[in-house]
Amino acid sequence: MITQERDGWELPDWQRQQADLITDPAELLDLLGLTPGDLPSCLAAAGDFPLRVPRSYAALMEPGNPDDPLLRQVLSVPEELREQPGYGADPLEEGEHTAVPGLLHKYHGRALLVVTGACAVHCRYCFRRHFPYQSHLSGKRWDQALAWLAERPDIHEVILSGGDPLTLNNRRLAQLLDALAGIPHLRRLRIHSRTPVVIPERLDEGLLERLANPRWRTVLVLHANHPREISASLADRCRQWQRAGITLLNQSVLLAGVNDEVEALVALSDRLHEAGVLPYYLHQLDRVQGAAHFAVADAKALELHRALRARLPGFLVPRLSREEPGEPAKTVLAG
Ligand SMILES: *Cc1c(COP(=O)(O)O)cnc(C)c1O
Ligand code: SF4
């Protein structure tokens, strides 16, 4: 649940959007002029990871197209209920890398903070859809994680993740950033977020002021999968953030029926670059229960990557990668 602040002030626009999400599949389908096919099965598949879509994201979908690549990312389908061998609840064995609750330490010099369990959108392929957020976020919140970081001078980069860290309001984020700023060996601040893609207004002035602070080298990693997700308003804001000195990157997940064709991936890189964002990773799907219908075979993924290299300048080709438990870095299948 998103906690709303009501101090007698109007909520910022992005927070109002975040409080007014579409959560009923029938409403979403109706908005798009689609007749529900097997709605009961879709609802059953949604289970404990229900539909959650900002209206501004729904507005980017193509009306009348049941196979729309944006719709496919958010609407549950009966295939999710099928058990698939090799697909589990914690595909990355993140349980094993939890240094203290709310902090994952897996790679040299970097630590990842699970700052919230909330997201502005629920993505059907999400590898953390079964993540035990309760056990990470209960109790004293960030205190233990901050204490751990303070004692680890080998950690130079803190990554805010979740859930989605930008679902937190600026006041909450400022509290966390102030605490982190007091830990001298932390130099790089990285934020992984999909919120700006679904609610571009989240990239607001107050947040920019905080992040463009000389205390940090700040990197914002967006999560866009399809060229149509780079709306004009997102691109405008990204360009403004880039001018302010924030490094902007994007990571995508390769998803069957969403972006598993050359034209979509070429257009995505082009549009990102026009917005001042460089493609970083193109991830092979993590094998999470309920997401098997999004999987793209490695052979096809490699072929797509070769085609991208033939079409784009090298700096607009994302690294095709996969996360393998126990490895010292993400495994790059093609660079
Ligand atoms: C992906 C990930 C990182 C960041 O990896 P980069 O290759 O630096 O982007 C850091 N920590 C954890 C736990 C991760 O899953
Ligand atoms: S926004 Fe990110 S963490 Fe949240 S559901 Fe989507 S992929 Fe998962």
Image (cartoon, rainbow, N blue to C red):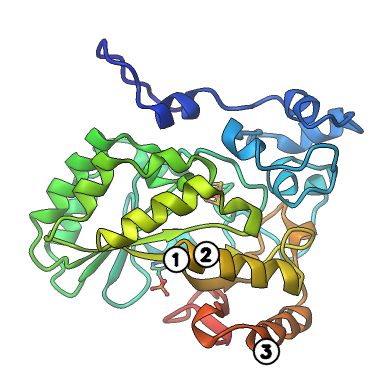
Q: Which residue appears at 75% of the width and 40% of the height?
A: 76
Whether tag 1 and tag 2 are in contact, CB under 8 A, the answer is: yes
Name the residue tied to disc 1.
277
Q: How many numbered discs? A: 3
40 horizontally vs 248: left or right: right
Q: Residue 266 placed where, x, y %? A: 66, 73
Q: Name the residue under label 2.
A: 272
Specify the quarter for ligand 1: bottom left
How would you rate the neighbour count of disc 2 (Cα within 10 Å): few for under 14, some for 14-19, many for 20 or more? many
* First in sequence: mark 3 vs mark 2: 2
Residue in view at x 74 percent, y 29 percent: 25
The residue singled out by tag 3 in the image is 310
Mark 3 to mark 2 CA distance (whole Å)? 18 Å
Q: How far apart are marks 1 and 2 (CA)?
A: 5 Å
Q: Position of residue 65 (x, y in %)?
A: 84, 43
Image spot of residue 218 (x, y percent): 26, 62
- Give above or below for 277 relative to 308: above
Number of residues whose C-alpha sits closer than 10 Å to that of mark 1, classed few (under 14), some (14–19) or many (20 or more):
many
First in sequence: mark 1 vs mark 3:
1
